[in-house]
Image (tube, rainbow, N blue to C red):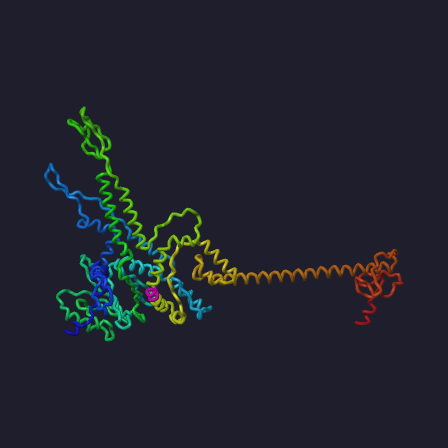
Amino acid sequence: METLQQKQSLLVKKPFTRVVAIGGDIEHGGTIMGDVGLETPLNDPVVRMRITQDDALRQLDPLGHLVFNKEYYPDIWRFDDESQKWYIEEVPRYAFAFQRIILVKHLTHLCGNDIVFELADEYDNEDSREVLNAFKRGWAKKDMEIAWYELARSVKATGDGAIVGFIDKGTFGWRALSYLNGDTLFPHYDRRTGRMNVFARKYQNYDDEGVANFYVDIWDDKYFYCFSQIADSDSRESTQYKSAKTLPKDSALLNFDISGYELIECSLHGFERIPVSYDRREYGPCWSYSQESIENYEMAFSRLAQSNHDFGLPIMYLKGEGSKELTSSDMSYASKVVILPSDGDAGFLNRQDASAAYNTELLTIENQIYRQSFAVRTPELKSGDTPGVAIKMMYSDAVENAINDAQLFQRAIDKLVEIFEYGYGVESEMRIQFKNVAIRSFIEVYIHRNLTEETTNMAMCVQNGFLSKQTASEKSYYSSPQEWSRINREQMEKQKMELLLEEQRVEMQNEHTVELQENLSDIQTDAQITVAEQERKIESGKDPDNTKKVQSKKGSVATGRGAGRPNRTGREYDTNGNWDGRNNWDAYNRTH
């Protein structure tokens, strides 16, 4: 039994607290003057007030605000002289959803942009780019941006949250664990390294009869466990013994006390480490530092409403005896008819207007609520196109807070990327490729911006040569993860089209050249025939003027032949060199 008592409790975690104004400089005994020698350590512990995650849920819902607590803000007791009885007059109560406004504004600047993934310089090559694009496609396919939003929303609203990954029949998936959904989270860390070694989730389900059954899901580096709360008849020792007996020998739960629950499932989760990305804020929800101002604002506004209810309408007075009101005595009606005696008088009381004082108080508190939460109300723009630097200055407080949150959430993002890289790598059979390529991930804070101005600036950078087209494509708001690959494909298709057009142009030019040469050959042949006919006419004397003879000392210009012998026989030759009466059959018969 001593061994069981030495084990660490599983379902415990550090509470959320706020500092209480007890102790401090006032109780230190004043200022010490002169040489006092060695200083004795002063015991001045900080007194903290414990807050729960249920408090965060009450603060997030306006109906759960403190102004509706009648012990904190009681109704008014009044005594009726006629009935001699006391009755309760309910006061107006107003609650405002400042917490939700702050939560939405924080999440907008923190999660408004997708997680940015970049390659390390030494891995920036074509193959690594393909792996990075596959990683981004899987990240979008598995809705990991929604997982990141669910984690941030849970941490901002309740103080902590987690994303757990799983592999079901070779398919990667995830689910969000949050107190918003009824999950109480219990992380446990190694004392030496600070690395998480066990993570537990306590929740409850309801059976058909509406009875709640409590369960505990647990993850360690190797196994997933599910425990169910047992009946009260079993003792803690026997339950602890039975659960420890069924656990694997290498289970991390052997060092924890799990009495009161029995093991109903134990299986391998399939990951190298605990597949849980957990984050926590010690001060609780994101509006914690503004909660006091929000409660004061609601109280002040409710009192203003009570004052308007009592003194907002004019108060009429009557003087004299025998006055008679002809209508109802309810003074809330606007129209009255009163009969007064001769010495009577009627009028309205002059009341002090407290609206200005209340307005100053409410306006000051409201401004402080937004300033303390680093939330910026949407400014009213007086021009159509505001420069980017002016927009950043308008939202400076929100941007600064988001930049700080981005640093605090970076470890959770790294763990979330690690879980996705392994789980989706198993599903897509690319685990080795993902592991061998160094992919850097970080949060890019969302800032309201002038997209036209940014696009113009990037275009100028590319034109001036100190920014690559690929980087501009990746940074552009309008681009997708596959944008650079699409641009390369378009360029290749354009080059193919240009080569095809060039081939068609060369082919058409060749056809035109052949046709031109054929036409020139026909013209040359016709010219030769014409020159031959003119020569025969000249030889036969039919062209005495000799006007169409085309010859030169070296031969005919049209045919390129020599001058030849002059025709003195008087024969007329045809195109084949024959003349009338010529018979070549004798020569043919001699040779055949």
Horizontal side of 285 relative to 125 (left or right) equals left
Residue 528 point in image, percent of width and height: 78, 61
Horizontal side of 255 relative to 512 (left or right) equals left
The residue depicted at 20 percent of the width and 44 percent of the height is 91
Q: Residue furthest left?
A: 84
Q: Is residue 523 magenta?
A: no
**Quarter location, residue 166:** bottom left
Q: Nearer the viewer, residue 203 or 290?
A: 290
The relative height of residue 428 versus residue 293 in the rendered view (above or below) is: below
Q: Nearer the viewer, residue 285 or 568?
A: 285
Q: Is residue 414 magenta?
A: yes
Residue 295 visible to the viewer: yes
Horizontal side of 118 relative to 102 (left or right) equals right
Q: Quadrant of the N terminus?
A: bottom left
Q: Nearer the viewer, residue 402 or 237?
A: 402
Q: Residue furthest right?
A: 568
Residue 432 point in image, percent of width and height: 39, 72
Q: Which residues are magenta?
A: 410-415
The overriding secondary structure of the stretch rendered in magenta is helix
The relative height of residue 312 versus residue 577 in the rendered view (above or below) is: above
The relative height of residue 153 versus residue 431 in the rendered view (above or below) is: above
**Quarter location, residue 43:** bottom left
Residue 202 visible to the viewer: no
